[in-house]
Amino acid sequence: MSASSPAAPSRGAGIAYFMAALVSFATFDAACKHLLQFYPAPFLNIMRYSTVAVLAAYLLVRHGVPRWSTQTHRGLLLVRGLALGTVGTCFMTALIWMPLSEATAIYFTSPLIMVALSPWLLGERVGRAQWAAVIAGFAGMLLIVRPGANLPALGTALMAISAVSYAVFQVLTRKLAGKVPGPVQYAYTAFVCLVMTALPAPFFLPDPFPGLRDALFILGLGICNGAAQIFLISAFQRVEASTLAPLNYCHLLMAVAFSTFWFDRPPDALAMSGMALIVAAGIFLVTRRPRAA
């Protein structure tokens, strides 16, 4: 029996947790797209982050509540939270006008943006092959947002801001890796996002307020989003990030399916080609092994 055999069940469980997280995220996005026909985006966001904040408090208590309020990396933690709060606000608002599949595809340019930012923010070297992948991914985005694609300018701009903000979030996550415990990072992010979404929420109250059925549905979505975060944590505890990263693009395939069969908005052939370019570029970046020195 090989030495790696005992880890196989844990590895399989990690991949299963990761796929469960992706299904939860894709379902959350599609359900929010549906609810935005009836309720304001700030209201749905505050409901989402209220649930996530409760989960964050639970994780802090469960892990012994470290002295997270006096962390030396507080500034980076706050910026990281602001970046993710911007993602949630812009993504949710863009879904009011954007088809789900195209919106998700633009969002998935964030790993490419992270690579483009890494020489300046992380001091990492980016080779020519990686730059070529970044350019190919952005060419794919241009196929999606091309003139004649009938995508709303405001929604497209908000999704672009969301992608850039998520790239900044990923860069800061990498900078903080090994320096700040995971529950502390999660708690800072959850509470910052809660404050960000609480500020506009009183000005966008639903009229009428959701009935019992919709209220339970919205609460369930918050739990779904929070559960996805737990699934992610469980997955990364069992499997290395380089193995899981290519699976992220299953989320995009789910978004295309939801957009096609739930909202009757299938992407056209050029948009599908753009998505394929983005996926290919992203998978190349996360699977390419650096050459030995």
Image: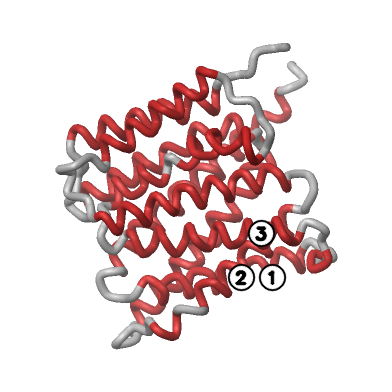
Indicate left or right for 40 with 152 as reference. Answer: right
* Pointer 3 or 2: first along the chain: 2
What residue is shown at x 34% (from left), y 78% (from top)?
Answer: 213
**Circle 3 sits in a helix, a strand or a loop, which is it?**
helix
Residue 204 location, x and y as percent? 37, 81
Indicate left or right for 65 with 85 as reference. Answer: right
Q: Quadrant of residue 114?
A: top right
Q: Are marks 2 and 1 in contact (CB under 8 Å)?
A: yes
Q: Amino acid at mark 1?
A: Ala
What whole-number distance in Å separates the C-alpha atoms at marks 3 and 2? 9 Å
What whole-number distance in Å separates the C-alpha atoms at marks 2 and 1? 6 Å
How is the rendered protein coloured?
secondary structure
What whole-number distance in Å separates the C-alpha atoms at marks 3 and 1? 10 Å
What residue is shown at x 45% (from left), y 24% (from top)?
Answer: 133
As drawn, 249 above or below 213: above
The residue beneath circle 3 is 186
Kindly give the residue lying farthest to the front in the view shown: 120
Q: Are marks 3 and 1 in contact (CB under 8 Å)?
A: no
The residue beneath circle 2 is 53
Q: Nearer the viewer, residue 192 or 184?
A: 192
The residue beneath circle 1 is 57
Residue 289 location, x and y as percent? 61, 19
Q: Amino acid at mark 2?
A: Ala
**Circle 2 sits in a helix, a strand or a loop, which is it?**
helix
What residue is shown at x 29% (from left), y 33% (from top)?
Answer: 274
